[in-house]
Amino acid sequence: MTENITLTDAAARRIATILSKDAAKIALRVSVEGGGCSGFSYKFDLVGEGLDDDLVLEKDKARVLIDSMSLVYMEGSEIDFVDNLMGQSFQIKNPNAVASCGCGTSFAI
């Protein structure tokens, strides 16, 4: 596994802004959980510490942690932040997903 997960400039800016408002939080954790309307869903949490097996993505002042179990499902993904008429949200562009739901947080492999 090459763990080639990327973070867009827009996502990095938003994460850095969020982290700057809470000194106790060091990163945004992105994980994959079972469930959601398409089988799997993404979860986003602010955390104060990492785990030994985390992949750490850093860009400018942003830090993202992804646990080893979630990496299996996120290989080759891009983490983006979108701000449009539909609202603001983090979105994962996952090349492994064969289906996803309209809300953008659920997917199937």
Image: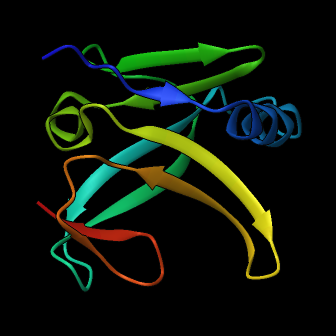
**Which of these two is toward me, 8 or 71?**
8
Image quadrant in which you'd find residue 11: top right
Q: Residue at point 43% right, 50% down? A: 93
Q: Is residue 90 above or below residue 34?
A: above
Q: Return the x and y of residue 40 as percentages of the image width and height.
A: 21, 67
Report whether 101 appears left or right of 21: left
Q: How is the image coloured?
A: rainbow
Quadrant for the C terminus, please: bottom left
Instruction: Reply above or below: 79 against 107.
Output: above
Tell me where residue 24 appears, x and y as whole percent.
72, 31
Residue 2 at x, y percent in the picture: 20, 13
Quarter of image, res 70: top left
Q: Is residue 31 above or below residue 35?
A: above
What residue is drawn where x is 17% and y is 64%? 98
Residue at (76, 39) in percent of width and height: 10
Instruction: Judge from the rendering whether residue 12 lies leftward or rightward of residue 73; answer left or right.
Output: right
Q: Is residue 52 left or right of residue 25?
A: left
Whole-percent x, y for residue 95 in the image: 27, 46
Q: Between 87 and 15, which is closer to the camera in this rendering? A: 87
Please give left or right for residue 78 compared with residue 87 in the image: left
Q: Quadrant of residue 28?
A: top right
Q: What residue is shown at x 15% (from left), y 37% (from top)? A: 69
Q: How many marks?
A: 0
Work out which quarter of the rendered image holds the N terminus and state it. top left
